[in-house]
Image (cartoon, rainbow, N blue to C red):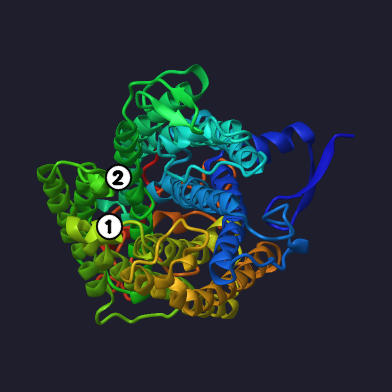
């Protein structure tokens, strides 16, 4: 009999048909289940990306030695040694997995899907079927990238940027043509999935807010998701079109990016008449806004957590909204700073340099607003608060190092060094990933109706924070002396031999940081089933998501229509005795009317 035993989330076991199981947990149209599908998928890929990073770090610390993992054959068929070609595949796949399969989908896919309807008082997304497809378009991408990694002899090795003519030359190398083609197909499918999600998010936020929820009563999480969706809607079609064009170059012999008379393997000549730099413009026109797609949602979620655990209204709410908007707008006109070493016109380079430096202004506004929020607050050092404070401090380091790279003369020297690696990881791992960890701890009770263990969470934070800085901070020093990235063995240059002990220390910290995530994994999965049950609002927060049950009801989210009377950050209000004032609580003079006197909304 096609039945399965299930738990309805309230401890009541029952049975459901296989068809109902598939429609509820597999091809679900419920935004909460889709958000959880994104969450579990990205956490799995986070583990895969971490394993790939360990392979990179092992080679830099102990070059040409066997890795003591799974018989030494996890990364190579040559007894555990990492070949130079496979090292190129490792950093290609590590970056691809972390950017396209972890950071972007966990922010926009997992938290965007789960939180947007709850935080605006909606029953679901505007287009549930489209929402389901935005997740299931990721699976062909997962498969394509997996195939590209496993294709012999070395897998896709064009870097996560897939620059031609390198990616075109690979098409003539035995065994590499299909690997790079599979890689391009996977990235293109990711772009399609993200475009489907962005349309849904924009429509939902604009059209389905609860009664009384004006745009300037939205929490910063929703503002950041809204602006991120705009970035995706305008930038992703460019990358998707570029991916299709490069696929046509590889499969049908078109010449969009292949230059005239490109010689391959000292014999074969590819005739194209195209421009390799055109790909860089198309790629970075998306991928620099993508940096903000990977950081803006984190900024919004951190803003909500800081206000909640400082027990204070957010400092400068409207300036923060305008700052996020400014970051997004400027993000579209600075893509050329990734191409300073491409030989661009100095006047054009000056334009990109100045516009890049301008982004520091709205970023600084946000930093000072966060500091103003926690200044004088009754700070509760919960696990989400610790991760949020870490995000702010690490983002400052990553942002300051970014100002150096905005200067063309400096970037020309450090562009291909580990200084870039340090900056990128301080923004995206030390910054975004720490915000994601905090958000998981913060909204876990709403997702599963249970709480995670605070003691284990603080150990997870402490170990991750220490080893994370031990891993990435020293990379600034490596980069300052010119230590190159993307080379399997820089030590054959006499200049860099003295850098080996520092790389070994970095690698030991990286392995310790990786192992520290075991605490998180055990805490996360144990708490799903055995964590203490919580009520609707365990953090005593003000947002609409805490007005519905934990976890929310399967369809509709709310057991009664929420009506909004104020903004989301009314902590310490003199109008009420408690230190929080929920958005759904009527003003004192309206208490007699109750908070369900109106129904419906602009759905």
Q: Please state which of residues 36 and 532 is positioned toward the viewer in this rendering.
A: 36
The 10 Å Cα crowd at callout 1, few under 14, some 14 to 19, many 20 or more, is: many
Which is nearer the eye, 269 or 196? 269
Q: x%, y% of residue 241?
A: 39, 26
Q: Image quarter for residue 594?
A: bottom left
Q: What element carries label 1?
A: loop
Up the image or down, 575 lies above or below 421; here it is below
**Disc 1 designates what residue?**
567
Q: In which quarter of the image is the N terminus?
A: top right
Q: Residue 227 carries which label?
A: 2
Residue 222 screen position, x and y as percent: 35, 50
Q: How many labels does the image show?
A: 2
Q: Can residue 487 be seen in this view?
A: yes
The residue mark sitting in front, 1 or 2, is: 2
Counting from the top left corner in percent of width and height, residue 233 is at 34, 34
* Residue 206 or residue 365, whichever sits in front: 365
Residue pushed farthest left?
347
With 390 as the anchor, is 451 left or right in this view?
Answer: right
* Of callouts 1 and 2, the N-terminal one: 2
Q: In which quarter of the image is the C terminus?
A: top left
* Left or right side of 357 for 39: right
Q: Which of 366 and 394 is in front in this view?
A: 394
Q: Are marks 1 and 2 in contact (CB under 8 Å)?
A: no
Taking the spot 52% from the left edge, 53% from the top edge, the residue there is 91
Residue 514 pos. (x, y %): 58, 69
Would you say 388 lies left or right of 376 here? Answer: right
Q: Is residue 402 above or below residue 372?
A: above
Q: What element carries label 2?
A: helix
- Quadrant of the rendered image containing residue 481: bottom left
């Amino acid at each position: 009999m096609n039945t399965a035993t299930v738990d309805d989330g309230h401890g009541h076991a029952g049975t459901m048909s296989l068809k109902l199981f598939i429609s509820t947990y597999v091809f679900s149209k419920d935004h909460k289940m889709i958000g959880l599908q994104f969450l579990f998928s990205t956490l799995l890929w986070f583990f895969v990306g971490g394993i790939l990073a360990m392979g990179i770090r092992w080679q830099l610390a102990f070059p040409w030695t066997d890795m003591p993992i799974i018989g030494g054959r996890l990364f190579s068929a040559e007894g555990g040694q990492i070949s130079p070609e496979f090292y190129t595949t490792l950093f290609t796949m590590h970056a691809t997995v972390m950017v396209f399969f972890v950071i972007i989908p966990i922010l926009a896919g997992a938290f965007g899907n789960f939180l947007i309807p709850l935080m605006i008082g909606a029953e679901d997304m505007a287009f549930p079927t489209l929402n389901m497809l935005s997740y299931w378009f990721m699976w062909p991408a997962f498969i394509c990238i997996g195939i590209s990694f496993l294709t012999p002899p070395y897998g896709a090795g064009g870097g996560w940027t897939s620059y031609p003519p390198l990616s075109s030359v690979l098409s003539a190398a035995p065994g590499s043509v299909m690997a790079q083609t599979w890689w391009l197909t996977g990235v293109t499918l990711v772009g399609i999935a993200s475009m489907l999600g962005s349309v849904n998010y924009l429509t939902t936020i604009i059209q389905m807010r609860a009664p009384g929820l004006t745009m300037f009563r939205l929490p910063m999480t929703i503002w950041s998701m809204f602006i991120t969706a705009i970035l995706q809607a305008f930038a992703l079609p460019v990358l998707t079109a570029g991916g299709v064009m490069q696929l046509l170059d590889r499969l049908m012999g078109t010449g969009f990016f292949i230059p005239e008379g490109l010689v391959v393997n000292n014999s074969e000549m590819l005739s194209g008449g195209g421009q390799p730099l055109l790909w860089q413009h198309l790629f970075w026109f998306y991928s620099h806004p993508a940096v903000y797609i990977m950081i803006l949602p984190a900024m919004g979620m951190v803003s909500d957590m800081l206000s909640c655990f400082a027990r204070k209204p957010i400092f400068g709410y409207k300036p923060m909204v305008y700052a996020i908007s400014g970051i997004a707008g400027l993000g579209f006109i600075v893509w050329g700073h990734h191409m300073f070493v491409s030989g661009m016109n100095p006047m054009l380079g000056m334009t990109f340099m100045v516009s890049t430096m301008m982004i520091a202004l709205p970023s600084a506004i946000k930093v000072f607003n966060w500091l103003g929020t926690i200044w004088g607050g009754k700070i509760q050092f919960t696990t989400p608060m610790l991760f949020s404070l870490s995000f702010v401090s690490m983002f400052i380091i990553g942002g300051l190092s970014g100002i150096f790279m905005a200067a063309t003369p400096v970037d020309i020297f450090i562009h291909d060094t580990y200084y870039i690696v340090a900056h990128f990881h301080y923004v995206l791992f030390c910054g975004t990933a720490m915000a994601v960890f905090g958000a998981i701890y913060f909204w876990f009770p709403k997702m599963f109706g249970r709480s995670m263990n605070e003691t284990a969470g603080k150990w997870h934070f402490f170990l991750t924070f220490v080893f994370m800085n031990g891993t990435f901070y020293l990379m600034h020093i490596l980069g300052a002396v010119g230590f190159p990235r993307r080379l399997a063995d820089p030590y054959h240059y006499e200049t860099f031999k003295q850098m080996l002990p520092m790389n070994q220390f970095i690698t030991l910290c990286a392995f310790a940081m990786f192992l520290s995530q075991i605490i998180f994994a055990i805490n996360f999965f144990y708490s799903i089933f055995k964590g203490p049950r919580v009520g609707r609002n365990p953090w005593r927060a003000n947002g609409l998501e805490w007005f519905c049950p934990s976890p929310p009801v399967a369809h509709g989210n709310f057991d009664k229509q929420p009506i909004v009377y104020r903004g989301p950050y009314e902590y310490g209000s003199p109008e009420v005795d408690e230190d929080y004032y929920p958005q759904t609580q009527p003003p004192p003079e309206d208490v007699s009317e109750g908070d369900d006197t109106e129904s419906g909304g602009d759905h």
